[in-house]
Structure formats: C-alpha cells, structure tokens
Image: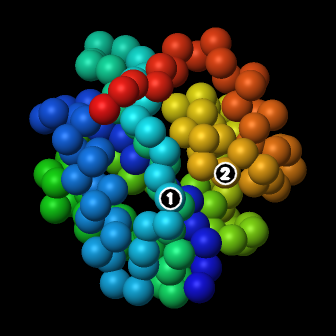
Amino acid sequence: MAKAFIALGSNLQQPQTQVQQALAALDTLVDTRVVAHSSLYRTAPIGYDNQPDFINAVAEVETTLSPIALLHALLALENSHGRERPFPNAPRVLDLDLLLYDALIMNTPELTLPHPRMHERGFVLLPLAEIAPDLTINNHGKVADLAVACLDQGVERINT
C-alpha cells in the first residue's frame, strides 16, 4: 500500500459540507482508505480575490492505486460534486489535489509530485502539519517547520 496525502478545498455550495462529504467519499474510492484527516481550516482566496473564503483540509490515504489512477479518481470525485474550471483560481465546489505519493518525485504534463507550491501554502501546510508534522517534503524540509513560516497567511482552524 502506498501512502498519499490529498488536499481538499471548497468555497461554494456549503463548503464545510462539501469538504466533509469529500472526506467520506475518499474512503469509498477503490483500493483506497482514509487513515487520517485534519480539522477544517478557513482560508482567504489566493490569486482571484473576488470570491468567498475557502474551507480546507488534508487527508492521508493508503492506496494500491497508481499515482495517475488516484489522480483520475480524484478528478472524477470533483466532477461528481459539480466542479467547473472557467478560469484559473475560480471559485469551486470541490478541489482535490494529490500532494504527495510516498516519496515519489514525478513531473509529467498530467501530474507533478510533490505538488508544486505546497511547501509555501499555509492552507496545505497547516492541516498537513496537524496529521503528519514529521513528514518531509523533498528539497524543502519538514512539514512542521514549513508550516511555522505560513502562520501569517490568515489560515484559521475552525471548530466543527
């Protein structure tokens, strides 16, 4: 079984509910099971500011799916929730990003691992540090240390 980490986000159609439903749905993916997930976090949008705040979380899964098969399963889950992609950084019902897959380094037109820019994004690092603080992101360092550098990004843990 491979260990993978998935970022979840939503800022449309009851975002908290969308993320909670997606966490449950991850556990139903073929040959995949959720072993841990973070709390929910509220985050201001990045890139395109004229939209609602996001609700974010991170899940750790064990899977026998290949990285590409897992990516395709995540995209199908996004689509089943009504994901549309009208322009970069647009508001979204559900966003699922494959962050890490074991220690695999991969760079194809379809998938880059580790996920680019994850090492500088508080909405990824703070939830990830909650469930895997000692995890190391290749060429960047330990998640807990990287998360400390993101404390000023306005990411707020919410009680559910």
On the question of residue 124 being in view, the answer is no
Q: Residue at x 28, y 55 (%)?
A: 22
In the depicted structure, whether residue 37 falls above or below residue 149: below
> Looking at this view, is 75 or 141 the one in front?
141
**Residue 76 picture location, percent across and down:** 26, 68
On the question of residue 102 being in view, the answer is yes
Residue at label 2? 132
**Residue 126 picture location, percent across and down:** 60, 33
> Looking at this view, is 29 or 159 the one in front?
159
**Residue 37 picture location, percent across and down:** 47, 52
Q: Crowding near pointer 2: few (<14 within 10 Å), some, many (20+)? A: many
In the depicted structure, whether residue 30 falls above or below residue 125: below
Q: Amino acid at mark 2?
A: Ala
Q: Amino acid at mark 1?
A: Ala
Specify whether 37 is left or right of 11. Answer: right
**Residue 90 picture location, percent across and down:** 30, 32
Q: What is the quadrant of residue 24 in the picture?
A: bottom left
Q: Secondary structure at mark 2?
A: loop
Q: Quadrant of the C terminus?
A: top left
Q: Crowding near pointer 1: few (<14 within 10 Å), some, many (20+)? A: some
Residue at label 1? 36
Q: Residue at x 61, y 72 (%)?
A: 3
Q: Are marks 2 and 1 in contact (CB under 8 Å)?
A: yes
Whole-Å distance between the Cαs marked 2 and 1? 9 Å
Q: Secondary structure at mark 1?
A: strand
Q: What is the quadrant of residue 39 in the picture?
A: top left
In the depicted structure, whether residue 155 falls above or below residue 55: above
Q: Does label 2 or label 1 sit earlier along the sequence?
A: 1
Q: Residue at x 74, y 25 (%)?
A: 148
> Looking at this view, is 149 or 130 the one in front?
130
Q: Quadrant of the N terminus?
A: bottom right
